[in-house]
């Protein structure tokens, strides 16, 4: 049976076997292809499993970032593969050995019929794969057209600075820029953006995985013949994790800055959360491990191909947990209540008040607005954001301050009391309850009148600051505002108007 026809038959069988294998491989490749019009094709990036080379946390250079105009254009449809043509179906009958064509003695089909049936099934698999590719191409085209229509609508809303559109475009930018380090453990839904139209702030919430149990391969040992993985020491591992965390934060801020540069939004806040197990109790924990707030211009001016992630993070006054061995969550610099509709646009009271106006006699709604404006003047150079709440006279929050300073910063609540009588200690107690309920760092109570001994005694050793009328005037004069407080005159006016306080 070692004839020329036997050799040709075996060669043909090998060709068909390789063809079947190529169809199986192609089927898996087609099944893995995905397209949503805006997500970069991450399947082309290297995956490292649990091992991440040390150089993978480096930030990309500026040339790799897309412009806002490019973000409004859907990604092109990925190239779908073509199914290769099959080998020759069979040899001419006169080239087959007679035993190959004859029926088998056991009554089963001949070897020729068996191979022919197998090749026919392979051709059926080829046709099914071609249909699958055609169906996927049509689905991708429908997605492209739908995404193009959606992005056109976003483009129109972007020019009007609609908050939801700015947040959506920031998230789109994240999807269009694949993460090149530690991506294996970063799901796509761990980047969320929210816009605050009153404070002109974009808040980005990130999730960073817990790498406590993972190893980091930084090379190999044992030579070329018997290579063995070389893993990072504990000190090297801590540096890699921290550098990756800082790179992730800086990347997020720079992405948002490219979206916000043409707009009136000037501040970007980033909070990073993590899930971990408490080593003391073994219980699962969740908390903020990193927080940063900086100006859009600061993020936009970074030369990412040259900065050191940790040095850049410190320069921007970010705060992070000191150790990943025993995590103590940090207080976020900026917290946004996404469902809070209390905040409204602030009024410019200074432009309508006459010099030497009696603050104790002005409408209480205007007094609250003036106090909020005063704190804007007081902290404008330090990046503090002041947000005014709706007027309700419910002894609640009149304004909220967000301070980005990593040491004294956080959330502050303001209450303004345009009183002609001393502020009762009950108001101070109410403020303390508000501080606790709001999760604020401190509460500040400002009044045109004064406080009694009970109020100062209660505020002692609590995160509460009391500002009376004389100190309020001192703060205003620091900014060139010459107002006055005449409580007796205000009482007479209140009696005439039938007002209290």
Image (tube, rainbow, N blue to C red):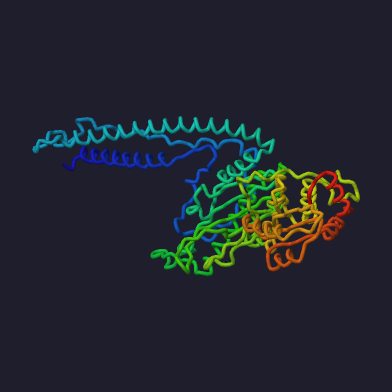
In the drawing, does residue 118 fall left or right of residue 242? Answer: left
Residue 101, percent from left and from top: 16, 33
Residue 286, percent from left and from top: 52, 58
Rendered position, 270 above or below 90: below
Q: Residue furthest right?
A: 356
Total tally of numbered discs in the picture: 0
Is residue 416 at all visible to an observer of this figure? yes
- Give the residue displayed 13% in from the left and 33% down from the top: 102
Q: Residue furthest left?
A: 105
In the drawing, does residue 370 fall left or right of residue 141? Answer: right
Pick the residue in front: 203 or 339: 339
Q: Quadrant of residue 498?
A: top right
Quadrant holding the N terminus: top left
Residue 312, percent from left and from top: 66, 59
Is residue 306 at all visible to an observer of this figure? no
Pick the residue in front: 363 or 129: 363
- Give the residue displayed 61% in from the left and 39% down from the top: 71
Residue 491, percent from left and from top: 85, 51
- Give the residue displayed 46% in from the left and 66% down from the top: 231
């Amino acid at each position: 049976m070692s004839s020329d026809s036997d050799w040709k038959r075996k060669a043909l069988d090998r060709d068909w076997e390789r063809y079947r294998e190529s169809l199986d491989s192609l089927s898996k490749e087609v099944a893995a292809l995905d397209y949503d019009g805006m997500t970069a094709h991450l399947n082309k990036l290297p995956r490292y499993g649990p091992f991440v080379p040390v150089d993978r946390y480096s930030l990309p250079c500026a040339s790799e970032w897309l412009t806002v105009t490019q973000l409004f254009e859907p990604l092109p449809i990925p190239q779908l593969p073509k199914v290769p043509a099959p080998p020759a179906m069979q040899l001419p009958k006169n080239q087959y050995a007679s035993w190959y064509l004859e029926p088998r003695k056991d009554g089963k089909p001949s070897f020729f019929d068996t191979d022919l049936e197998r090749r026919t099934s392979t051709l059926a698999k080829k046709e099914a794969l071609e249909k699958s590719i055609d169906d996927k191409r049509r689905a991708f085209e429908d997605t492209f057209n739908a995404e193009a229509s959606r992005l056109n609508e976003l483009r129109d809303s972007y020019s009007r600075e609609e908050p939801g559109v700015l947040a959506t475009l920031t998230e789109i930018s994240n999807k269009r820029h694949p993460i090149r380090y530690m991506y294996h453990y970063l799901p796509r839904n761990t980047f969320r953006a929210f816009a605050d139209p009153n404070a002109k702030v974009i808040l980005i919430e990130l999730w960073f995985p817990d790498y406590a149990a993972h190893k980091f391969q930084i090379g190999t040992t044992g030579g070329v013949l018997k290579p063995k993985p070389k893993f990072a020491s504990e000190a090297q591992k801590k540096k890699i994790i921290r550098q990756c965390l800082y790179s992730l934060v800086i990347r997020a801020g720079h992405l948002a800055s490219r979206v916000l540069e043409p707009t009136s939004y000037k501040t970007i806040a980033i909070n990073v959360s993590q899930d971990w197990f408490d080593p003391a109790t073994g219980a699962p924990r969740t908390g903020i491990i990193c927080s940063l707030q900086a100006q859009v211009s600061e993020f936009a001016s970074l030369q990412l191909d040259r900065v050191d992630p940790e040095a850049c993070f410190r320069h921007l006054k970010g705060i992070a947990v000191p150790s990943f061995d025993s995590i103590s969550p940090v207080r976020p610099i900026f917290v946004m209540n996404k469902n809070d509709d209390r905040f409204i646009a602030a009024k410019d009271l200074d432009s309508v008040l006459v010099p030497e106006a009696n603050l104790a006699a002005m409408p209480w709604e205007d007094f609250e607005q003036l106090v909020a404006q005063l704190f804007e003047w007081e902290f404008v150079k330090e990046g503090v954001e002041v947000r005014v709440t709706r007027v309700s006279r419910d002894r609640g929050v009149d304004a909220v301050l967000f301070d980005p300073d990593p040491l004294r910063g956080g959330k502050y609540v303001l209450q303004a009391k345009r009183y002609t009588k001393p502020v009762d200690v009950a108001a101070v107690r109410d403020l303390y309850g508000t501080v606790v309920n709001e999760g604020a760092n401190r509460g500040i109570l400002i009044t045109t009148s004064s406080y009694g001994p009970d109020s100062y005694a209660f505020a002692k050793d609590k995160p509460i600051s009391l500002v009376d009328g004389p100190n309020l005037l001192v703060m205003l004069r620091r900014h060139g505002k010459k107002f006055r407080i005449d409580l007796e005159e205000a009482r007479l006016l209140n009696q005439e108007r039938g007002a209290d306080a």
